[in-house]
Image (cartoon, rainbow, N blue to C red):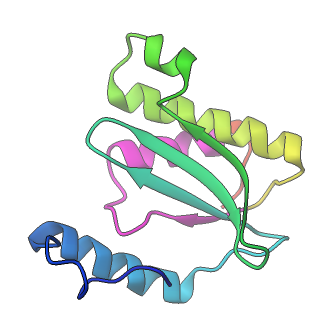
Amino acid sequence: MAISIRHNKNTKGRTASRLRRQIRGRKKIQGSAERPRLVITRSSKHMVAQIVDDLEGHTLVSASTMEADLRSSGDDKTAKAKRVGELVADRAKAAGVSTVVFDRAGNKYAGRVAAVADGAREGGLEF
């Protein structure tokens, strides 16, 4: 994996702990062509969801709160995160993906991360 904790001097505290959890999770979770990986990237303002085939190294579909229609909506961050989950599910179904492996990237399964997962499930993805 391309995640390194030691070589980044600015990685401290909470971020280092999250990166360790992320590395630990990636040992167990791997996406394939039949079951790609649904990766959640969470920042303080935005959420990004990508469906990745790890064997090929390709992103199949993605959705983000940085897209124009979600940026302009006046919803709170949790509602936008749920909408991201629904968008990625719709795009995945169009690409022929129905089952995925959920990768929370070391974040707690609560709040906006759980909202993306709920939106993806409501959109028809199975995991």
- The residue range painted magenta reads 100-122
Report the side of 94 relative to 90 (left or right): right
Above or below for 87 versus 21: above
Quarter-wise, where is residue 56 in the image? bottom right
Question: Percent x, y for residue 28?
Answer: 54, 87
Q: Residue at horizontal 76%, vertical 79%?
A: 55
Q: Residue at horizontal 27%, vertical 71%?
A: 18
Above or below for 53 versus 120: below
Quarter-wise, where is residue 101 in the image? bottom right
Q: Residue furthest left?
A: 13
Question: Percent x, y for residue 1?
Answer: 50, 84
Report the side of 122 relative to 8 (left or right): right
Question: Percent x, y for residue 42?
Answer: 37, 50
Give the quarter of the figure containing the C terminus: bottom right
Query: Residue 95 or 67: which is nearer the viewer?
Result: 67
Q: Residue at horizontal 73%, vertical 66%?
A: 36
Question: Percent x, y for residue 54?
Answer: 70, 75
Magenta-colored stretch includes residue 106: yes
Query: Residue 114 or 72: which is nearer the viewer?
Result: 72
Q: Residue at horizontal 21%, vertical 76%?
A: 17
Above or below for 6 versus 49: below
Q: How many marks?
A: 0
